[in-house]
Amino acid sequence: MTLLKIARMGHPVLLQTAEVIADPTARNVGRLLEDMVETMEDAAGVGLAAPQVYEGKRVIIFKSPRERGEDGGAESDFSPLTALINPEFEPVQDELALGWEGCLSIPGITGAVLRYSHIVYRGYLPNGEEVEREATNFHARVVQHEIDHLDGVLFPMRMTDLSLLSFNEELKVFMEHASAQATADANEENLPS
């Protein structure tokens, strides 16, 4: 296995639509997936799409570990390390949730993005087996984020409020300010007129 270089925002490969894989079981696809897993683990990520390692192919890997979810979360909130070829998704409900996202291709930056909170995704496993799963919450967010990479979309392009884009080091200060502002707004609403 080989550690791959991760493309960063600004490189054209991240803005292109990735090619459909004709044979999910092809040896070169298996090698790419092995290298992607090693690269993602080395970078401490939870997802990686082939365009992020300069391969314009419709291949993603992701995981949604229990430690990232809420206590008592639904089984659909979690996923072991999964490799999907030619993935696609559709929302189960129209409900959108705002959540913080980072990206290995945009190091040091976090932003709040609206995503569907309940989806069904499908694709092919490396052995050629077709799979279809429900995903909720963080699991759904990760899958949507990675599929976006296959369509040339980076998370800031999905943001509706760029004031919610922050350097990671500043996010704690930002969150403390937002919390204080929300408390002040709530207290102001409760004052008698």
Image: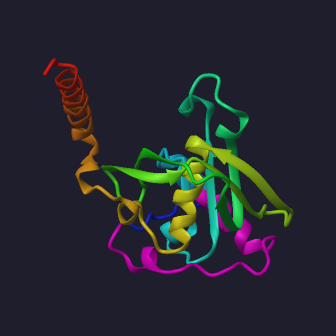
What percent of the width, then of the height, locates residue 20?
A: 68, 80
Height in image: 80 above or below 18?
above
Q: Foreground residue, 160 or 189?
A: 189
The reply to whether residue 165 is in sight is: no
Height in image: 101 above or below 156?
above
Q: Foreground residue, 8 or 179?
A: 179
Image quarter of the C terminus: top left
Question: Which residue is the extreme one toward the left?
Answer: 193
Question: For the point 85% across and 67% down, which residue is it?
Answer: 128
The magenta-colored residue range is 9-36
Q: How is the image coloured?
A: rainbow
Question: For the point 21% across and 40% down, which residue is it?
Answer: 170
What percent of the width, then of the height, locates residue 104?
A: 43, 55
Residue 136 falls left or right of residue 168: right
Question: Which residue is the extreme one toward the front?
Answer: 193
Q: Foreground residue, 191 or 137?
A: 191
Magenta stretch holds residue 58:
no
Residue 54 falls left or right of residue 9: right
Quarter assignment of residue 27 = bottom right
Quarter assignment of residue 85 = bottom right
Magenta stretch holds residue 28:
yes
What percent of the width, then of the height, locates residue 165?
A: 27, 51
Residue 191 falls left or right of residue 79: left
Q: Foreground residue, 7 or 82?
A: 82
Question: For the point 58% across and 54% down, which residue is it?
Answer: 94
Height in image: 181 above or below 162?
above
Height in image: 141 above or below 23?
above
